[in-house]
């Protein structure tokens, strides 16, 4: 058996049992576990996690892992001042997260590329509204995967004014590279929170995708959005007194446990940086794109 077929078989063996797992129940269980304050549990668990995933605590504002009241506080830790540099160039977009690039390319005929042999609908990703998806048709997207060792707060790539937020219930498959390669339409099937902003280069969608064991997605303007998971799509519009304006580099949300962020922009808005290629590592704040001149 050649290497490609061995990899594909391995991916299927990892992915298909997830169809049988109670994803939301496991995530609620994880939510409870990661908030246990008992030192005898949370300290050894945190120590194991740091060693297993090679977490760099020298970047954290609080470098002592035992000082956090529970594991989730450690996992969503803040960085110390100077640990990341936000690109100050107004013609550049900043990475919203630490992670690894999965894809960065155009949105073609309303479809977003996932992995070889798989794509999914932009309309489905944004909650099923053709009107909501229309401004992004012919635009560009990037998908960034956050590993367990990464910093898990999400920041603004560019100055923006929040227009709407949509919570789309769904499955909770893993979003690991192996699962992404074999589960069709993964990111449009998993539970997600979509934040749509108005920016100087047009609309920007920040899609925070849930995954198995992701025990919550939060935003700075509304707190914990999920759980509960629910069964129907919920949406909020922000106008008038509810207007939310965030500058490039400001925190917009966080994952309580890790997942994936997808950015989408309208047509003729930007050019992805040459460094933004599949599997490339990115750090929050660094340049990921140049704004096109009018």
Image: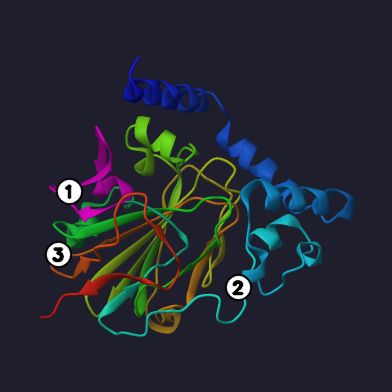
Q: Which residue is mark 2?
A: 79
- Residue 267's disc is 3
Q: Dot 3 surroundings within 10 Å: few (below 14), some, or many (20 or more)?
A: some
Residue lying farthest to the top in this orientation: 1
Whether residues under marks 1 and 2 lie with C-beta atoms below 8 angstroms apart, the answer is no
Q: CA distance from mark 1 to mark 3?
A: 12 Å
Residue lying farthest to the front in this orientation: 2
- The residue shown at (52%, 50%) is 147
Q: How is the image coloured?
A: rainbow
- Vertically, is 194 above or below 289? above
* 222 is within the stretch colored magenta: no
- Residue 110's disc is 1
Q: CA distance from mark 2 to mark 3?
A: 34 Å
Give the x, y percent position of residue 152.
55, 61
Mark in the foreground, 2 or 3: 2
- The residue shown at (46%, 23%) is 16
Identify the secondary structure beneath mark 3: loop
- The residue shown at (45%, 42%) is 175
Pick the residue in front: 73 or 216.
73
The picture quadrant where one finds residue 159 is bottom left
Identify the secondary structure beneath mark 1: loop
Residue interval drawn in magenta: 103-125
């Amino acid at each position: 058996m050649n290497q490609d077929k061995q990899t594909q078989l391995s991916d299927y063996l990892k992915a298909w049992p997830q169809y049988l797992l109670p994803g939301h129940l496991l995530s609620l269980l994880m939510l409870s576990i990661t908030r246990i304050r008992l030192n005898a549990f949370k300290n050894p668990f945190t120590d194991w996690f740091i060693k297993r995933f090679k977490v760099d605590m020298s970047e954290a504002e609080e470098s002592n892992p035992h000082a956090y009241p529970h594991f989730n506080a450690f996992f969503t830790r803040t960085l110390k001042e100077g640990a990341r540099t936000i690109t100050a160039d107004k013609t550049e977009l900043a990475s919203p997260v630490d992670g690894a690039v999965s894809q960065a390319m155009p949105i073609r005929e309303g479809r977003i590329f996932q992995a070889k042999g798989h794509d999914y609908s932009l309309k489905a990703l944004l909650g099923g509204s053709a009107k909501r998806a229309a401004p992004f048709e012919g635009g560009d997207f990037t998908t960034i995967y956050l590993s367990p060792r990464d910093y898990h707060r999400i920041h603004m790539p560019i100055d923006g004014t929040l227009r709407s937020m949509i919570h789309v219930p769904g499955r909770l498959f893993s979003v690991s590279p192996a699962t992404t390669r074999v589960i069709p339409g993964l990111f449009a099937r998993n539970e997600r929170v979509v934040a749509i902003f108005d920016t100087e280069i047009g609309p920007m969608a920040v899609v925070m995708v849930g995954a198995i064991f992701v025990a919550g997605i939060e935003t700075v303007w509304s707190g914990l959005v999920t759980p509960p998971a629910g069964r129907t799509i919920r949406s909020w519009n922000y106008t008038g007194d509810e207007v939310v304006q965030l500058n490039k580099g400001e925190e917009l949300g966080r994952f309580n446990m890790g997942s994936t962020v997808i950015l989408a922009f309208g047509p003729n808005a930007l050019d992805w940086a040459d460094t933004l290629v599949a599997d490339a590592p990115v750090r929050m704040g660094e340049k990921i794109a140049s704004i096109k001149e009018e």
